[in-house]
Image (spheres, rainbow, N blue to C red):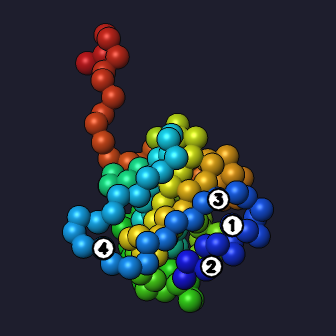
Amino acid sequence: MIEAVVRYLRQAGVSFRMTSYPGPEPRPQVAHRFTPGTQLVDAHVVLVDGAPALACTPCDVPIDLAAFATETGAMVLESSSAELPDEYRGAPGPLPPLGGVFGVPLFIDERILQAPRLGFRAFAPNDYVELGYDDFALVERPRVVAFARGELPPHPPGES
């Protein structure tokens, strides 16, 4: 399935770097080194008003479904690749945060906007893709929403 990601990005005309470690490694696994400034991200399948979509967060940061629903004004449920269309139904994870590959909308958490480059795994734990955020945004046209769980910002002075 990684071929679909490569084909999609090549057709879009963006520069990207793909690295694959096809053989299983003994523990501990090989650590992949990204270009400095690259944010590793995860893609999650969600249902937004009953339709499948991808939600992209910084790596290992869960989605706050209530915040996602509030931000979008839609009913949002956690889902799985079983909801993806056609040939990608039940695709193995980790999924790439490329809604265009799957034919579904992409939502990204606002924290991702701070990264000049994004890195993600694509269908296998040892297949990595890295590209500039500007190219990613140009191709994907994601909807930016605040939905990643994390620490709340401090209260501004004078508020209770």
**Percent coordinates x, y for residue 104 in the rendering:** 59, 71
Disc 1 or disc 3, which is closer to the eye? 3
Which is in the foreground here, disc 4 or disc 1?
A: 4
- Local secondary structure at mark 2: helix
Residue depth check, mark 3 versus mark 2: number of the one nearer the observer: 3
Q: Left or right: where does residue 157 sit relative to residue 139?
A: left
Is tag 4's residue or tag 1's residue first in the polypeptide sequence? 1
| Residue most extreme to the top | 158
How many angstroms separate mark 4 from mark 1 (CA)?
28 Å
Task: Tell me where residue 10 sits by quadrant.
Answer: bottom right
Name the residue type under label 2.
Answer: Ala
Q: Secondary structure at mark 4?
A: loop
Q: Quick check: 86 above or below 81?
A: below
For marks 4 and 2, the one nearer the N-term is: 2
**Dot 3: within a 10 Å radius of its alpha carbon, few (fewer than 14), some, or many (20 or more) residues?**
some
x 63%, y 49%: residue: 132
Q: Nearer the viewer, residue 60 or 121?
A: 121
* Image coords of residue 48 (percent x, y): 49, 66
Tell me which residue sits at (73%, 58%) in the image: 14
Please give the residue where the numbered disc 3 appears in the rendered image. 16
Residue tagged by mark 4? 25
- The reply to whether callout 1 and callout 3 are in contact (CB within 8 Å) is yes
Which residue is tagged 1? 9
Q: Earlier in the sequence, mark 3 or mark 2?
A: 2
Q: In the image, what residue type sits under mark 4?
A: Glu
According to the image, label 2 marks what residue?
4
Label 1 sits on a secondary structure element that is: helix
Mark 3 and mark 2: span between their CA atoms?
A: 14 Å
